[in-house]
Image (tube, rainbow, N blue to C red):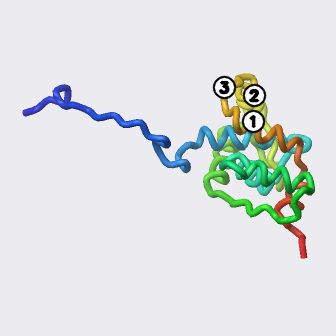
Amino acid sequence: MSSIFETSFDFRFRKRPYSADLRSDWRISAVLLALAKCRMRRASVTQLHALVWAMLADGHGAQMAASLSGDSTEPVPIRFDPAVARAIDLAVGLGLLARDGKRIRFEPDGEVWWQSLVSDPSLMSQEKAILDNLGTVSMVDIERAVGVGRS
């Protein structure tokens, strides 16, 4: 009988080792970074979905920036990602965030996690650059960008 130690293993580099839905630490971190860019550090769920969407793929951040600045009149087609909703719920459950009615805000532990993200330039540098380009974002800004209330 062969021992497991006598078996050869073949390791392969994979761009994404497992599904994005299962990378809750990245999603929670993205939500925390997005929340910090919201006016008064409070956000609606729509704001968080829109800002995380802007971080997800090349071009999304530029598209959001153009809409927020008024350079584009086309609504931004954001995706309400169930993984972001789960990340928000996880962050609330872990005591990083709290719900105040329809708004989400930081809890002290969330501030600590966020501070560790922003203090290390090697962590989520592309995502931080995208959000820095967008500046502080209000709910009205996001509603205008995504076309809520347009006739």
- The first of marks 2 and 1 along the sequence is 2
- The first of marks 1 and 3 along the sequence is 3
Percent position of residue 150, x then y: 89, 71
Percent position of residue 98, x then y: 77, 44
Q: Secondary structure at mark 1?
A: helix
Q: Residue at x 75, y 28 (%)?
A: 118
Q: Is residue 149 above or below residue 128?
A: below
Label 2 belongs to which residue?
A: 118
Percent position of residue 16, x then y: 49, 43
Q: Quadrant of residue 92?
A: top right
Q: Is residue 72 above or below residue 37?
A: below
Residue 122 shows which numbered tag? 3
Label 1 belongs to which residue?
A: 128
What amino acid type should be assigned to the residue bearing mark 2?
Val
Q: Residue at x 73, y 54 (%)?
A: 49
Left or right, residue 19 beside residue 141: left
Q: Quadrant of the C terminus?
A: bottom right
Q: Residue at x 82, y 53 (%)?
A: 44
Of marks 2 and 1, the one in the foreground: 1
Tell me if label 2 and label 1 are in contact, CB under 8 Å. Answer: yes
What amino acid type should be assigned to the residue bearing mark 3?
Ser
